[in-house]
Amino acid sequence: MHKTLLVDKSICSRLLYSINMTRNYLLGIDLGGTQLRFILADEKNGNIFINKINMKKSFPSPFCSAELYKDKCFRVLPDSVKINAYIINKLLAYLENLNTRKEQISGIGISVAGKVFSDKSFIGANMPRKFTRKIGNKYAIDLISALNKIFKTRIEIENDANCAGIAQSIYYAHQGIDPNTTFYVTVSTGLGGGGPQKELDEIGHMLVDGYFPGLKPRCGCGAYGCIEAFASGEGIRKQTLTILDMYLHKPAVFKQFNIYEKIRTANKYDVQKIIGKSELVKLRQHQQAINTKTVFELAYQKNPDKFAYYLVDTTAGRFAKILVNISRIHNIERFGLGGSVITNNPQYINLVQNKINQYNADCILGQKIKVHPAPLGDYAADYGALFLVVEKKYQKRWIKNLIKKFL
Ligand SMILES: [Zn+2]
């Protein structure tokens, strides 16, 4: 009896092993600013838990630190090939660890936090130029050619927001919504977006107007007054500090600012009146850290901090205008909003929706715009890369599986 059981067990494990060896997977590479992540998913149904093992694994991003290249195997290489060498080195170790042969990879999708050019080369957002080489008339990295030497399969690459937007649009398509009318927006440290309409890009750098001249902020792109510099996590934090410092240290300028805001908001806000009672002033006076999280928490607490709410309300107004503009020009009807500022503050979405309705109320074009939490939520990054290479015939099963497992 004991012996039979043992035999059964070994047949079982051999069977499992052989199933594994013949299964095909899609590989997702999420090339972020701080992390490099790999994910394997069953090609047919998108399952990422295979034999109860989660197929996700993270490494430090090849963009972020020269420390990574101290190892002799990288040190001897020219700078321009180090990033590709690092990614491939980690990838092969990852596959070996999961007992997966490269022939089992039937497609590779790459999501990059950075700019992807039309020839599919790219540049990472925070990547030192010395790691690039001249390709055509620009400096970039060609990861696809390097991977193609090892993997004889289809490889696609896209900017991370576009990946999330494409994955989200496939989800919407299976809900009966035209994917081309959908767009993904992420509001975290920065502000950006993506979707199936390729020409709709770099929304964070649309210029906004209607602010007090002393509040004109500089954007990470170098320009002044981009929406990212007002409405991103970092933008909200900096605006808050600028107004607080004006109040605390430049009373004459603050007085002008207050008049300006009274006119702009048709007397809805008298900032001078509400700022004095704000917890944010006390935090600033005591040199305690103020971040976007603090502002939202105070704005939405049971007894709201009126100045904090004014900051959130103003930001929502500017952000909503940008969304209405995008909608009118590109015929977008659904915005899936993601990123930490949104996911940590779900009430903010309602505020943005109310502003949109308000701006659209008298418009005879009658475009209905809906904003809601990005349907794939935190999985947008993981599945964003994978969805670039999911075959159409399997998409429905992937979406069904995703809804059942995570949503
Ligand atoms: Zn900008």
Image: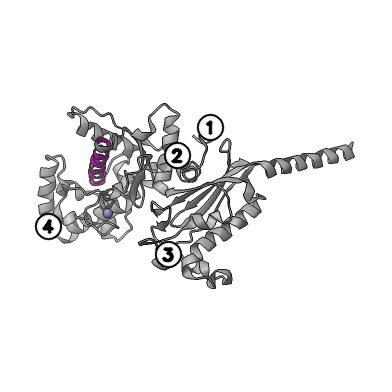
Of the numbered discs 3 and 2, the one sitting upstream in the chain is: 3
Q: CA distance from mark 2 to mark 1?
A: 15 Å
Residue type (three-letter) at the residue carrying disc 2: Ala
Q: CA distance from mark 3 to mark 4?
A: 46 Å
Mark 3–mark 2 Cα distance, whole angstroms, equals 29 Å
Number of the front mark, 3 or 4 = 3
Q: Which residue is mark 2?
A: 167
Earlier in the chain: of badge 2 and badge 1, it is 2
Question: Is residue 236 rendered to the left or right of residue 212?
Answer: right
- The secondary element bearing badge 1 is classed as helix
Residue under label 1: 393
Query: Could you say where residue 400 lies in the image, as x and y percent from the top left?
Result: 52, 31
User: Main SS type for the magenta part?
Assistant: helix
- Three-letter amino acid code of the residue under disc 4: Val
> Residue under circle 3?
132
Question: Magenta segment: does it hold 313?
Answer: yes
Q: Secondary structure at mark 2?
A: helix
Q: Is residue 332 left or right of residue 162?
A: left
**How many residues crowd mark 2 within 10 Å: few (<14), some (14–19), many (20+)?**
many
